[in-house]
């Protein structure tokens, strides 16, 4: 454990020293992965599939505010759908406008959660972002996680129904509109996923704020169980066809990664908990103080070893010999 704490302090020192370089690099990598995933899922517009375009947009995102990344990702999705079907692009654009109003109203600083939620869902660790949002965010973070779940459901629905949408004639535009709207708004899998993620965020947030020992660990376990139960119950009631095996496999990985997040964000020593009581003119205060687990980063000491000079006997010169002889004669 001590070695892990030393590495934690070492990494914090590196980040504090090179933050001006690490932050843009991380934003560039996040934008690059997001755009590549969108191109891989849709990829209808050949110009946007160009690696040079993706690199340029990712480079711009690394120096601009984080919300620019969300706008760019939404623009990529709408342009791909425009190249595929105008009806799909119009419906998704209207849905994005509604989500943007909710996002910028309640949680405009949770950009990372919106972008990482679809990635985690595609990697079969869907509970990671709801757990992280409940641990580090507020109840409003449920909006960001829900928006990310909606984006993932849109990409999956459109990629799974490409052949069906292509089979509808261009003359039957109203029928295509109806098919897309019904498929997105009546997508029970998406609704169950959004509800499960929102419940997970609220449960984790409420439990981790309690004055309990190991409250964060209890919150993570409870949130994982709530998410699994919500998805399974939703599948039984509305027949969402959610795969149970990926959920059972991904839940422990999500819990382990959330525990790693706790190590870097909230690592305390409950064995040294102190209870303090004091008062002023109007109130009595009962405080529970839990110290953080920290360790000093070992400092390197450099010892300089210098060779000692030997004491050489002085050699007598000619003048010294004459003086010694005169003194002897006297």
Image (cartoon, rainbow, N blue to C red):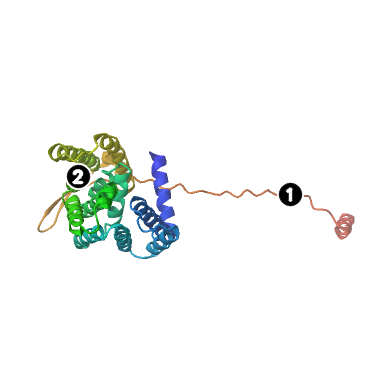
- The reply, left or right, for residue 238 in relation to residue 145 is left
First-in-chain label (1 vs 2): 2
Element assignment for label 1: loop
Q: On the rendered image, what quadrant is the C terminus found in?
A: bottom right
Crowd around label 2: few <14 · some 14–19 · many ≥20 (10 Å): many
Q: Is residue 203 above or below residue 21?
A: above
* Residue 29 appears in the figure: yes
Q: Which residue is mark 1?
A: 311
- The reply, left or right, for residue 101 in relation to residue 46 is left
In x, y percent, where is residue 34?
35, 54
Give the CA distance from mark 1 to mark 2: 90 Å
For residue 189, which numbered disc appears in the image? 2
* Residue 203 appears in the figure: no
In x, y percent, where is residue 309?
71, 49
Q: Nearer the viewer, residue 181 or 57?
A: 181
In percent of the image, x 11 and y 55: which residue is there? 283
In x, y percent, where is residue 154?
25, 51
Q: Nearer the viewer, residue 111 or 273?
A: 111
In percent of the image, x 41 and y 45: which residue is there? 6
- The reply, left or right, for residue 311 in relation to residue 319 is left
For residue 45, which numbered disc appears in the image? none
Q: Nearer the viewer, residue 2 or 103?
A: 103
Quarter of the figure with residue 126: top left
Element assignment for label 2: helix
Q: On the rendered image, what quadrant is the N terminus found in?
A: top left
Quarter of the figure with residue 243: top left
Q: Nearer the viewer, residue 94 or 4?
A: 94
In x, y percent, where is residue 139?
18, 52
Whether label 1 touches label 2, CB < 8 Å: no
Give the foreground label among 1 and 2.
2
Crowd around label 1: few <14 · some 14–19 · many ≥20 (10 Å): few
Quarter of the figure with residue 67: bottom left
């Amino acid at each position: 454990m001590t070695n892990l704490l030393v590495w934690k302090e070492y990494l914090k020192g590196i980040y504090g020293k090179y933050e001006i370089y690490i932050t843009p690099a991380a934003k560039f990598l996040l934008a690059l992965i997001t755009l590549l995933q969108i191109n891989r899922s849709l990829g209808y517009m050949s110009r946007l599939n160009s690696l040079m375009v993706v690199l340029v947009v990712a480079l711009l995102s690394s120096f601009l505010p984080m919300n620019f990344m969300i706008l760019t990702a939404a623009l990529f999705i709408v342009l791909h759908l425009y190249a595929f079907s105008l009806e799909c692009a119009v419906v998704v654009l209207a849905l994005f406008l509604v989500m943007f109003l909710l996002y910028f109203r309640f949680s405009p600083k949770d950009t990372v959660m919106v972008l990482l939620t679809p990635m985690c869902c595609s990697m079969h660790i869907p509970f990671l972002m709801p757990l992280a949002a409940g641990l580090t965010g507020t109840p409003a973070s449920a909006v960001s996680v829900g928006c990310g779940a909606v984006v993932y459901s849109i990409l999956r629905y459109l990629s799974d129904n490409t052949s069906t949408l292509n089979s509808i004639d261009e003359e039957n535009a109203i029928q295509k509109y109806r098919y897309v709207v019904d498929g997105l708004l009546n997508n029970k899998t998406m609704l169950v996923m959004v509800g499960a993620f929102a419940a997970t965020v609220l449960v984790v947030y409420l439990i981790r704020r309690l004055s309990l020992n190991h409250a964060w660990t209890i919150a993570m376990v409870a949130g994982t169980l709530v998410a699994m139960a919500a998805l399974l119950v939703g599948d039984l009631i509305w027949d969402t066809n959610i795969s149970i095996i990926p959920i059972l496999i991904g839940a422990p990985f999500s819990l382990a990664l959330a525990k790693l997040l706790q190590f870097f964000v909230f690592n305390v020593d409950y064995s040294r908990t102190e209870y303090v009581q004091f008062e002023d003119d109007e109130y009595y205060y009962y405080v529970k103080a839990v110290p953080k687990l920290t360790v000093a980063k070992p400092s390197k000491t450099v010892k300089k070893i210098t060779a000692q000079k030997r004491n050489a006997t002085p050699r007598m010169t000619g003048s010294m010999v004459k003086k010694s002889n005169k003194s002897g004669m006297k």
